[in-house]
Image: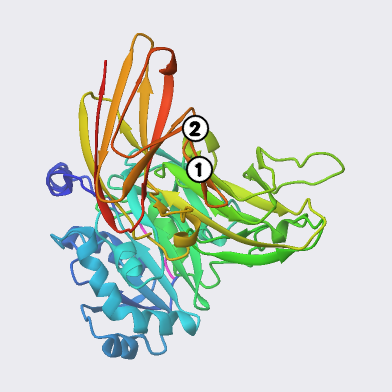
Amino acid sequence: MLRSWFAAKLLIVALGFALVYPAAAGALEGVEIVAWTGYVGELEWANLRDPLEGAGATIVETETRDPDELSGLLEGVEFLLLPEQADAWLWEDDLEPYGQDLAPALRAFLGRGGRIVALTWAVGGEDILRGAGLTTAEDSLDVSAQRLVVVAPGHPLVQDVPEEFIAPEFSTDFWMVDPDAVDIVATQDDTPVVFILQREGGEIVLLGFDFLEVVEASEQLVINAFLPDVEPPVEPPLVTFVVPGELLEGKLAPGERWEEPEKQLGLNIDPHDQYVLLQLEGNLDLHLRRDEPVEFGDGPAAADLSLLGPGGHLALLSVDMLDSDIVVLALANPTDDDQDYRLVAWIVPDLEEIDTFPFDTTGELGPMPVEALDRFVETEEGHLALVQYKIAIADGHEHLNLSVAGENIRAYIRHGEPVTLVGGTVQADLVFTDHVAISGPFLVPGVYYIAIEGLTPPQTYDIEGDLR
């Protein structure tokens, strides 16, 4: 998160904005906490430490990067605190190596039922945890002074916390949050600010506060995080979440459908993502539904989108079109034979939108970001690039000239929808290898997609174009 946080910090200090509320005396009596304080800011740490000690907790501070030393400090202790590291003067990614170093100790601590409480605003606990491979979450937008909402009422973590409260200065929400996270406090846009993860037999509580300013609700949340049994039993999710890029293989018997929700697959969608790529091999129907399981009956499946067999499928879906947090996938075999399938879902960073003419751009084809994608983008003669180019052509234009350069490179054009692959065959309106000119009645207004195929990836290529 890139923010002018140091200047803002000076302003807060100058205004005397940091407030400390009296902690519930005795609430944490006998609780022992180890805190990693390698780069904590003096004021932030005082505002966090004082209410915890005021509630009866004992805190041992450490700056070690030695996992064995940290494991020794955590012996017999139930809680590890990773505060905002406000004096780090580092990029977020610079803290990840600390997490990599400490990962064995963190995982062992969680493995015996320990709890990690991590706070962050710009550079903090979640960066260390991400480096340790314990979360994918990253701090996102500054939500200071926004209205926050308790989205898990009755949860022990929100005991004595109002249902709504104003976020203190230097609060953040999160994105790239793990699919199994349990959201506790969120913004009014439903982005998480406080959430919980179950990991390695223990639990992690992440809070988007740096504690330069304190409000009563944020202080109560932190105190509650160190009370026993923060996380009550959670009902298992209705569907099984799939990891983007993970290859799923199996077999469906004739007429078999994934009718039970637990057989269906959930794909976690983040608003920062642009497109979702779904690729299926097998003569099967692929059904998608937003935010809830697909329902099967005597008629068509209750789904938002159905890609019907026979044949393989490649679907490129806009996140804006999906407009949901979760997409649920279900397969059905409409044939009279057993059908083997291979399915992979991938988050595509973006289509390259071209809105300035003339243009000249370069790119690279392959290797695929995950090995499982190789076979899915394999055409009859080469490989298709994941990233496609999008051109919007309005009324009044008469000529579109395109050229592509590169060794053993060809380009495909399709009007109205992305270029796709079915059974190794590229689905497109036109293919060219060097230069193409589209004009007159053939140049229909609308959106055109351009995909690059290379015969011997990895390869670089160049595309030029002009519109008149």
Residue extent of the magenta highlight = 22-26
Q: Is residue 160 visible?
A: no
- Look at label 2 and name its amino acid: Glu
Q: Residue 134 vs residue 97: left or right? A: right
On residue 420, the disc is 1
Q: Is residue 287 visible?
A: yes
CB atoms of marks 2 and 1 within 8 Å:
yes
On residue 384, the disc is none
Determine the image quadrant of residue 105.
bottom left
Taking depth in this image into account, of 312 and 402 the one nearest to the observer is 402
Q: Residues within 10 Å of mark 2 (few under 14, many from 20)?
A: some
The spot of residue 429 in percent (x, y) is 48, 31
Question: Which residue was labeled with disc 2?
Answer: 417
Taking depth in this image into account, of 104 and 44 the one nearest to the observer is 104
Q: Residue at image x 74%, y 56%?
A: 258
The spot of residue 46 in percent (x, y) is 23, 63
Is residue 68 positioned above or below 190 on the image?
below
Judging from the image, what secondary structure is the residue with disc 2 in? loop
Judging from the image, what secondary structure is the residue with disc 1 in? strand
Q: CA distance from mark 2 to mark 1?
A: 9 Å
- Look at label 1 and name its amino acid: Thr
Q: Is residue 233 magenta?
A: no
